[in-house]
Image (cartoon, grey):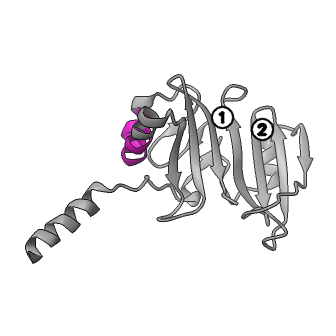
Amino acid sequence: MRLTLIFLIIGICGYAQNPDIISYDEISINGIDNQSSENDLISAFGKPSSITKPKYDCGTLSADWNEVNVILYEWDGIKIHFVNGILEIGEIDYRKANPKIKTPQIIIDSSTTLLELQKAFPNSYKIWQEQNEKYGSKILSIWLTEFSDSEFHITIDNEKITKFNLYHPC
């Protein structure tokens, strides 16, 4: 009986898969990483179309919830936050812009294929594929740390990457 229970637990744990992980310290966009300055950001992308202090109602970026100073830099198809002086990718819309996001596993841009995503992030890809088949999910999720609330989301539409963003839940 004990042996059967042990094998059952091992089987369940072995079957359950978590998304892949990319540490925020391991990612860059057009050579800019989380330690880059405002000058570095403007050198890489040019003058932004807008610089604002957004008011988020809830979550990590909410001044009502946390002691954060958030500045949002926007270009056509690109949103990048400085949160207490640390750069954070907001959203990349690959239908409008085509920066290169470099991770240890892959360089992501508008030409990245599903096969490349599958090789780079096999667990996340498998989860996405199952969710896509069952529910039509377009979001491939990658954790920042194990059991992270925040995730990198890669939006896939018609077998093309259309967006990359850092998602913070409320």
User: Amino acid under label 1?
Assistant: Pro
Q: Going by the image, does 92 lie left or right of 124?
A: right
Decide whether the magenta segment is chiefly helix, strand or loop: helix
Find residue 99 and name its label. Answer: 1
Q: In the picture, which quadrant includes the C terminus?
A: bottom right
From this viewpoint, is residue 84 visible?
A: yes
- Residue pointed to by mark 2: 45
Q: Going by the image, does 60 lie left or right of 113?
A: right
Work out whether residue 77 or residue 37 is closer to the camera in this orientation and state it: 77
Residue at point 42%, 32% (across, down): 133
> Element under label 2?
helix
24 in magenta: no
User: Amino acid under label 2?
Assistant: Phe
- Label 1–label 2 contact, CB within 8 A: yes
Q: What crowding class fits label 1: few (fewer than 14 Cα within 10 Å), some (14-19), or many (20 or more)?
A: many
24 is higher (above) or lower (below) than 96: below
39 is higher (above) or lower (below) than 115: below
Task: Provide residue 3's location: percent of width, then percent of height.
Answer: 9, 73
Magenta span of residues: 116-128
Q: In the picture, which quadrant includes the N terminus?
A: bottom left
Q: Quadrant of residue 149?
A: bottom right
> Element under label 1?
loop
Q: How many marks?
A: 2
Residue furthest toward the front? 1
Residue furthest toward the top? 158
Residue furthest toward the bottom? 2
121 in magenta: yes
Residue at point 43%, 36% (across, down): 134
Residue at point 66%, 30% (across, down): 94
Task: Provide residue 66's location: percent of width, then percent of height.
Answer: 78, 72
In space, the residues marked 1 and 2 are separated at their CA atoms by 9 Å
From this viewpoint, is residue 44 visible?
A: no
